[in-house]
């Protein structure tokens, strides 16, 4: 008997250790008969910690455990237990009413023991409370469903891109943008996404592991729009970027508004510049003739009676010339307004081009006192056409006046008129001071004068009137520098834009 004492002591120690382990284990160990009513033969004491019931309550009443299985899960559980006749392993989850009067989710696994003939003799199993895990999983599912619902309802394009260049998710709005129907089970390819988002921005988000914002144009429903896209990297626990979430918004209206504001700002700046040039011109160009008029009148009032008729006439002529200059400047301002607003344009008026050019040349040379030879060259079959005489006169007169004004006396000016069945060309050549390159961009702007005009009088409206008159007739004007000095202004007017009868004279 004494020989068995060490063995018995070892068994008691082993049972004690086993009970301690079971007491702290989250898993409840039990054994049960493999046949109905599935009588529990043994159950670990930690069942009280897990369920709130004592082991005896499970062992003494075969129906105790079954009666606390949720009614909706009971049939499934019994069907699973019936499989112990056929299967060696069972696994199930169900709701169980614990002593706290709350249903807990239990995860249960059973190993079926059999005799040598294969007949089931016992079921050894365990169960654990997985309520917290299930609640957590349910919360995640609800959260995922919520975010998915929000993403699907969003009017933003939302796309989840993996580091392997695959599309893991795309919302309905992005599908529509790509023409990718909801009925298509496959997700769009990475190449499809590049129609909406620049690849460089996607790769930048992966590489820098920082959010990237980009704006780009895209074609959606055959319409060009602008997208503003945030690309947000999503990392795993090891801080490796696994995904980039793209959230793109249609910012077309915003861009259009910005462009409109930019245009309005530019127009305001141009208007301010125009005001400044106008004030500069008026204070300079108007001041001189007004001063001439006032001084001549003052001299005439003071000394007129003592002067000879020739001297009095000289001052009277100065007053006339200054008044004519003022009148011309005012006429130029009014003419710009007339052409801009197409006021008084008579397109159907029959014009003899050659005769009109000769008239303008005579007027210009008379005003210039024939200090500059003007050569007129006319080629082509057409002589008379239908157009606005005043606009065509403006073109010829201002181009010739400028050519003479900015050329030294004695240097000739050439006027070319070339008429074709469907258009005409007017070219004015001079050997004057030309236009500095930096001034050419503003050559036709109102009141703008080049830096090389020095003290040569002018309003800066001549070329503006020319350009507006050319445009009123549906034509175009170009400037080029002549080799060896001087300028060439070329005007092309399409006769097909003119109304009336045949243009042939």
Image (spheres, grey):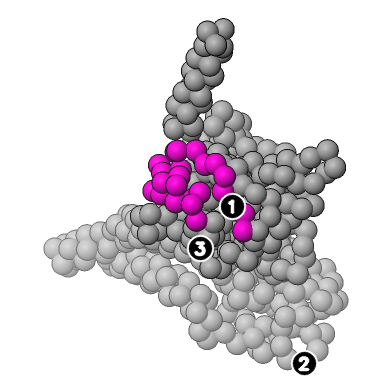
Q: Please report the bounds of the magenta region as a residue range.
A: 37-61
> Given this view, does label 3 or label 1 mark the residue nearer the observer?
1
Could one spot residue 245 in this view of the protein? no
Rendered location of residue 487, percent (x, y): 65, 50
Question: Disc 2 designates what residue?
Answer: 501
Label 1 CA crowd tier, 10 Å (few <14, some 14–19, many 20+) = some
Identify the mark nearer the N-term, 2 or 3. Answer: 3
The quadrant in which the N terminus is found is top right
In three-dimensional space, the C-alpha distance between marks 2 and 1, rounded to whole angstroms, equals 115 Å
Q: Are marks 2 and 3 in contact (CB under 8 Å)?
A: no
State the mark number for residue 39. Answer: 1
Q: Secondary structure at mark 2?
A: loop
Rendered location of residue 257, percent (x, y): 47, 64
Q: Residue at x 56, y 36 (%)?
A: 235
Rendered location of residue 99, percent (x, y): 38, 54
Asked if 340 appears above or below 238 in the picture, the reply is: below
Identify the mark nearer the N-term, 3 or 1. Answer: 1
Asked if 131 appears above or below 365 in the picture, the reply is: above
Question: Disc 3 designates what residue?
Answer: 67
Q: Are marks 3 and 1 in contact (CB under 8 Å)?
A: no
């Amino acid at each position: 008997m004494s020989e068995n004492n060490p063995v018995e002591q070892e068994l008691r120690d082993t049972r004690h250790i086993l009970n301690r382990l079971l007491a702290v284990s989250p898993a409840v160990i039990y054994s049960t008969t493999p046949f109905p009513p599935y009588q529990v033969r043994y159950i670990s004491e930690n069942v009280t910690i897990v369920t709130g019931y004592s082991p005896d309550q499970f062992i003494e009443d075969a129906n105790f455990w079954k009666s606390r299985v949720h009614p909706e899960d009971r049939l499934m559980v019994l069907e699973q237990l019936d499989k112990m006749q056929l299967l060696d392993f069972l696994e199930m989850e169900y709701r169980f009413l614990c002593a706290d009067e709350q249903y807990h989710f239990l995860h249960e696994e059973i190993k079926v023991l059999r005799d040598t003939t294969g007949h089931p003799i016992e079921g050894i199993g365990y169960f654990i409370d997985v309520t917290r895990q299930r609640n957590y999983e349910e919360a995640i599912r609800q959260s995922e469903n919520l975010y998915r619902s929000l993403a699907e309802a969003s009017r933003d394009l939302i796309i989840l891109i993996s580091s392997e260049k695959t599309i893991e998710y795309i919302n309905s709005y992005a599908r529509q943008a790509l023409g990718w129907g909801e009925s298509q089970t496959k997700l769009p390819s990475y190449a499809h996404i590049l129609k909406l988002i620049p690849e460089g921005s996607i790769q930048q988000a992966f590489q820098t592991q920082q959010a990237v914002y980009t704006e780009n144009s895209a074609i959606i429903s055959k319409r060009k729009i602008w997208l503003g896209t945030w690309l947000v990297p999503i990392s795993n626990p090891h801080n490796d970027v696994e995904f980039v979430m793209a959230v793109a918004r249609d910012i077309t209206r915003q861009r259009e508004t910005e462009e409109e504001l930019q245009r309005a700002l530019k127009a305001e700046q141009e208007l301010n510049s125009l005001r400044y040039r106008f004030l500069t011109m008026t204070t300079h160009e108007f001041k001189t003739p007004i001063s001439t008029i006032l001084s001549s009148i003052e001299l005439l009032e003071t000394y007129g009676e003592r002067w000879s008729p020739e001297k009095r006439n000289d001052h009277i002529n100065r007053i006339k010339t200054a008044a004519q200059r003022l009148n011309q400047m005012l006429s130029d301002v009014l003419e710009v307004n007339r052409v801009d607003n197409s006021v008084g344009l008579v397109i159907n008026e029959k014009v003899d081009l050659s005769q009109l050019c000769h008239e303008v040349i005579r007027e210009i040379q008379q005003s210039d006192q024939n200090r500059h030879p003007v050569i007129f060259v006319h080629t082509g079959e057409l002589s008379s056409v239908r157009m606005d005489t005043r606009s065509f006169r403006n073109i010829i007169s201002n181009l010739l006046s400028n050519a003479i004004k900015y050329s030294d006396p004695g240097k000739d000016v050439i006027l070319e008129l070339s008429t074709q069945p469907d258009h005409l060309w007017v070219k004015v050549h001079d050997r004057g001071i030309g236009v500095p390159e930096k001034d050419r961009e503003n050559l036709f702007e109102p009141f703008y004068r080049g830096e090389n005009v020095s003290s040569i009088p002018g309003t800066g409206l001549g070329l503006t009137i020319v350009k507006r008159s050319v445009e009123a007739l549906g034509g175009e004007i170009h400037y080029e520098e002549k080799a060896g000095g001087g300028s060439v202004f070329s005007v092309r007017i399409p006769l097909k834009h003119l109304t009336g009868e045949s243009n042939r004279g």
